[in-house]
Amino acid sequence: MTALAGRRVLVMGLGRFGGGLGATRHLLAAGAAVTVTDLAAPETLDASLAELSDEQRAAITWRLGEHRDEDFAAADLVVVNQAVPPGNRYVRLAQGACAETTTELELFLAACPARLALVTGTQGKSSTVTVLAGLARAAGEFRRVHLGGNIGRSLLDDLPDMQPGDLAVVEVSSYQLEHLASRPPRRADVVVVTNLMEDHLERHGTLASYHAAKLRILELLREDGIAILPAGVEPESRQAAHQAGRPSPTAWTHTPEPSHPATLTLGPTAFLHEGTPIAPLAALALPGAFQRPNALCALGAGLALGLEGAAMAAALPTIAGPAYRAEELGHFGPAASRVIDNGVSTTPDSTESVLVGLDAPVALLVGGRSKGLPLGPLVEAGRDRLARVACFGAAADELAAAFRSLPIQVSVHPTVESAVAHAFAHMDPGEVLLFSPACSSFDAFNNFEERVRAFRAALPKV
């Protein structure tokens, strides 16, 4: 990408999760003439706008609540928010006017001086990057460890203080990967794909397209880098994601099944690399057996980066997981019921992975907007664990119909708040309340974090 100073740059989507903000600050600092355009109403962007200084806001041309054709036609460069699907007519208009297009991720990759570890996957991305960053910090091999990306923090803001002796650990989504240029910068020392499951078909159309978007992360790997991939991802799939004539990177596979040969496996008592223990399973502080494969990926990435196994084993007990992932909130209500917040869940299988690790009886809160994904495995997982299910939001009737195949109490509610109130009014002593929606939040909220805040605010006092 050419120098940014003096160029007319359009940021398409200020957003609420930091990517648009990070890009805007980065572009202003580089001397670009910046226009920010976002279809969202200005009042919904107040929190993002407050993150910019008065001087920064004054230097920007604003288009909030609308997009204008003339802005896209006049731009030299358009920074496209990951939420914008490919083929968007404004993006096509800009490209037709000979503008370059890029993303916040590619701006960062082009400028990053640090070593890079990139992580994607259907589930476990945030946990894996959190554990890997914690291991790297504890090992002391890097001057500084930067954690960001799709986890909710743009690393463009870290660039002024970033040095070659640093490590950047970056969570990457399928949306970001789908937007990559045809020849993206190959900068990563290690890339990780935690798993390839079913999600985001409303965006990608088919499961094959979704998985292909995930595997584009391989295009960001250095030729001497290491890819950590799920067992079953065939070598031709890895190679297909690389440019013709380039060698395939070194690939390590991982699997939770020790009976299957792989470079990284979960043994009966330890995390294993080539059959040799890296750390005991009991050292993992993150709650839930579902976190073990994520920790295995993080430990493997640490080894690929040159971290000592003994140092990582010593650090593992000190690392807490990210918020909203099987997070223990304490005890609430008149019966002091234990409450677990797995509010990050937007798919049935991510709810199932937490549910199977709990002892009965469980009161489950699910709901939101359906993604049309199969509910059968989740329902079956609840057969011997669930005492009741409270279904809320747009998908409440669909969810209730599925769970009524079980001999449990099933109720339907319009909101998260009413589902919480009903659950606490009917739970028996000893029941565990699991908030794990299994659906998207977009029926009533802008994002899953808003839904989590609504859930937590509705919890009764002890």
Image: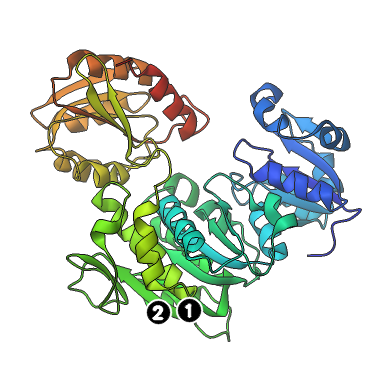
Q: Which residue is mark 1?
A: 239
Query: Callout 2, which amino acid?
Result: Pro
Q: Is residue 433 visible?
A: yes
Residue 336 pos. (x, y %): 22, 20
At 45% across and 50% down in the image, what residue appears? 126
Residue 378: name its quadrant. top left
Q: Is residue 278 above or below residue 66?
A: below
Q: Position of residue 388 (x, y in %)?
A: 17, 26
Spatial CA span between label 2 and label 1: 6 Å
As drawn, is 168 to the left or to the right of 313?
right
Q: Quadrant of the image for the N terminus? A: bottom right
The reply to whether dot 2 and dot 1 touch (C-beta < 8 Å) is yes
Quadrant containing the C terminus is: top left
Residue with the mark numbered 2: 235
Q: Is residue 39 left or right of residue 390?
A: right
Q: Which one is nearer the viewer's eye here, 247 or 313?
A: 313
